[in-house]
Image (spheres, rainbow, N blue to C red):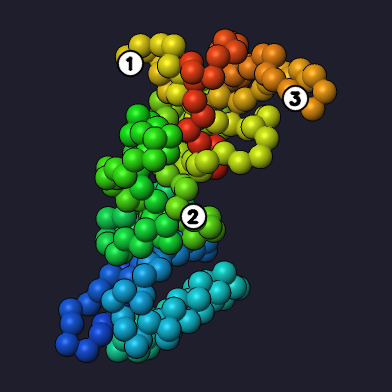
Amino acid sequence: MSTATLSTRRAEFSLLEVCLPGRPPISAGIILRDPATGDFRLRLRRDWESFAGEEAEVLSLLADDLASKLSEPGAEDWLRLCEESFSHTLRLSPRESVLAADLDKTADRLYSRHVRPNVLPFVTHLPKYSARVAAGRFLDDNEVEAEEWIEIPENLRLDPGMFIVRITGHSMEPRIPDGSLCVFRAPVTGSRQGKLLLIERRDVSESGGRYTVKRYRSQKTSAGEEWSHEKIRLEPLNPDFEAWELDNDPNLFQVIGEFVRVLD
C-alpha cells in the first residue's frame, strides 16, 4: 500500500451560503474539518461588494470573525453552535464526508468545485497566459486576452504586472515542480543578479526550449563609469541539469518576468 494511501483520511466539509432577500442562496465558501486532529481549513470568496450590495461590509466582518473563531481552541463546539443558530443571511449546509490526503489541497479543490466568485482583475485574480503570449504582452506591449483568470490566495498582494504561466520541465525542482502554475511579475526592476527569471531564448527553435526559467547570474566589466556584461549564465536549481552561458548578444534573449511563487 502506498504512503499516499496510508495518509489519506476521511474529513468533513460544509458549504457556507449567503441568503439575500429575493435571491437564491449564493455559495460563499467551504469549511473543511479533520475529525482526527480537530484542524480546520476555511476558504471564502472575497468579492462581497460585487454581489451583496449594502450587506457586503457586514458579510466581510462575519467572514473575518469566522476565520478567527476557527483558529481558536473550542472551534468545534463553536461551529456546532453556528450550525444550529446561524442567521437567515448566513447558512451552513449539513456536513459531508470527503477523503483528504492533504487538507489544504482538498480545501482548494472543494472551493473550486462549489464556489464561483466574480473575477476582480488584479485584486483577487490574475491572468494565465502561455509563455509565448506573455512574452508578446510584456515585451511588445500588446493587449492580449487571457486564457483564463485564476483566483490567487489572499496573502499575495497583486498588481497589473503579474501573470501566470504553467512551467514544464524538471530543471528547477524542487522549488518549481514540473507542470506547476507559477506567478511572475513584469517588468523586472533593479538588479537581475540571483533572481529566478522567465526568459525567451531567440537562438533556439519554436519547438525546443524557447522559454525557460533559470537563476540569472552575470559577470560585468567596467571602464570608468561604463559597464557591460562579460558573461551571462543561466543556472538550474536541480543538480541533475547543467547551467549554460548565453552569448553576449541582447538580441538572442529577452527577460519576460521575475518568478514570484508557485500556485499548485
Mark count: 3
- Position of 224 relative to 38 (above/below): above
Q: 162 and 13: which one is in front?
A: 162
Q: Residue at x 35, y 11 (%)?
A: 205
Front residue of 114/186: it is: 186
Going by the image, does 227 lie left or right of 40?
Answer: right
Mark toward the start of the polypeptide (1 vs 2)? 2
Classify 10 Å Cα crowding around label 2: few (below 14), some (14-19), many (20 and above): few
Per the model, the C-alpha gap separating discs 2 and 3 is: 33 Å
* Residue 4, quarter of picture: top left
> Which of the numbered marks, if any, corresponds to residue 206?
1
Q: Extreme right residue here?
A: 224
Count neighbours of disc 3 (C-alpha within 10 A) and say few if under 14, some if 14 to 19, many if 20 or more.
few
Q: Position of residue 75 (x, y in %)?
A: 53, 74
The residue that label 3 is drawn on is 226
Question: Please, what is the three-letter code of the amino acid marked with disc 1?
Answer: Glu
- Disc 2: which residue: 159
Element type at marker 1?
loop
Residue 204 or residue 178, whichever sits in front:
204
Q: Secondary structure at mark 3?
A: strand
Report whether residue 256 is seen.
yes
- Which is closer to the viewer, label 3 or label 1? 3
What kind of element bears circle 2? loop
| Left or right of residue 238, residue 103 in this image | left
Residue 225 appears at what percent x and percent y? Answer: 79, 27
Distance from disc 3 to disc 1, alpha carbons, whole Å, reads: 35 Å
The disc labelled 3 sits on which kind of residue?
A: Glu
